[in-house]
Image: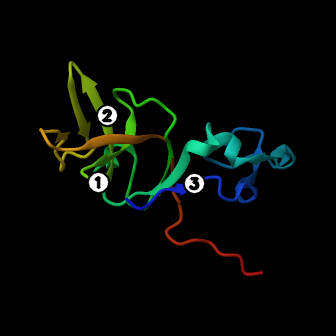
Amino acid sequence: MNHPVPLVEDPAALHIVETLCRVPAGFPSPAQDHTQRRIDLNEVLVLNPLSTFLFNVEGDSMKGAGIQHGDKLVVDRSIEPKHGLVVLACVDGEFTVKRLYRRAGIVKLVPANPAYEPIVFSDGQEMSVWGVVTWNLRQVLATRVRSTS
């Protein structure tokens, strides 16, 4: 994991056009071209602007939860971390993304990949939940599409 970046550094850059209809995984009707409005992605992605950050994922320990290497995670520090939520935790000074297990006095961080073991804490080990993952932003194309204008 890298250092946190506030998601709302440049709110104007987060505007996008939203169509007001659902699109099947086929061909939409041409009549739907005119049913759209501009939305601000801050309204969709950010519940609490001052406590929301963007992290880049490194590794594959959460691939079973749909979180892959290179994804960008929206993390909100104001949400209470609860059992079962995917969290960004700091373990011995290092960030990690895992599912929080908190039951019967046992706290551990559980990966979503059977190749990895849960992180179980021992005396002297430091762990804190930094925030709760609220969104996973994944780029669909392998390379970024750049404007040629």
- Observer able to see residue 107: yes
Give residue 93's mark: 1
What's the distance in space between the residues labelled 1 and 3, CA to CA? 20 Å
Residue at image x 19%, y 45%? Answer: 114
Q: Position of residue 134 (x, y in %)?
A: 50, 40
The residue mark sitting in front, 3 or 2, is: 3
Q: Which residue is mark 3?
A: 6
For marks 1 and 2 on the same chain, the one whose residue lies earlier in the sequence: 1
- Choose between 33 and 62: the one closer to the eye: 62
Left or right relative to 116: residue 73: right
**Given the image, on which type of amino acid does mark 3 rest?**
Pro
Kindly indicate the quadrant of the structure image that contains residue 104.
Answer: top left
What's the distance in space between the residues labelled 1 and 2, CA to CA? 17 Å
- Choose between 15 and 2: the one closer to the eye: 2
Residue at image x 56%, y 43%? Answer: 51
Quadrant containing the C terminus in the rendered view = bottom right
**Looking at the image, what colour scheme do you see?**
rainbow
Mark 2: give few (<14), some (14-19) or many (20+) Cα within 10 Å: many
**Given the image, on which type of amino acid does mark 2 rest?**
Leu
Give residue 100's mark: 2
